[in-house]
Image (cartoon, rainbow, N blue to C red):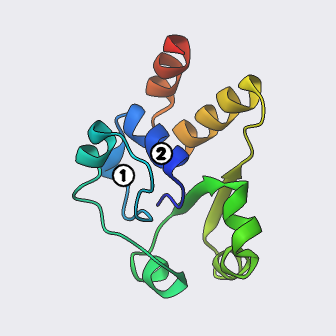
Amino acid sequence: MSLHDVTTEMVVALGATDRLVGITEPVDASPDVARAVGHVARVGGLESILLLRPEVVLGLAVVEERDPDLVARLRERGVAVYLAAPATLDAVYTALDAVAARTQASAAGDRVAAAL
């Protein structure tokens, strides 16, 4: 599950959209990303997220800044939450690697990182 456009775009770039059970409604998605996630369920809050039973929830640190209660409640329920804070280019590579690992797309992560 992805709660931010950036991590949704990473999952799409990794070719792992089949592993997405839900996303927040994209705010500024390119046409390619919008097409790639068109079949993915949209979520809007804790109940809609839990209903889809995600193994991991991806996003950026801003997700927790905006709704710390949501993130805390997901973690309390045993949902793995990864929130990246890519303020530097190295942090972008780290986030991409982490998203790739969490979506079982590490080989694709190496390929995407090399293309950056």
Q: In the shown orientation, is residue 91 left or right of residue 74?
A: right
Q: Is residue 5 above or below residue 63?
A: above
Where residue 101 sits in the image (x, y, percent)? 56, 39
Q: Earlier in the sequence, mark 1 or mark 2?
A: 1
Residue identifier under label 2: 103
Where residue 92 sits in the image (x, y, percent)? 67, 31
Please tell me whether mark 2 sits on a helix, a strand or a loop.
loop
Quadrant containing the C terminus is top right
Residue at 39 percent across and 75 percent down: it is 52
Residue at 53 percent across and 12 percent down: it is 114
Mark-to-mark CA distance, 1 and 2: 7 Å
Q: Quadrant of residue 93?
A: top right
Q: Quadrant of residue 94?
A: top right
Q: Residues within 10 Å of mark 1 (few under 14, many from 20)?
A: some
Residue identifier under label 1: 19
Please tell me whether mark 1 sits on a helix, a strand or a loop.
helix
Are circles 1 and 2 on residues that touch, CB within 8 Å? yes
Q: Residues within 10 Å of mark 2 (few under 14, many from 20)?
A: many
* Amino acid at the residue labelled 2: Thr
Where residue 72 sits in the image (x, y, percent)? 74, 78
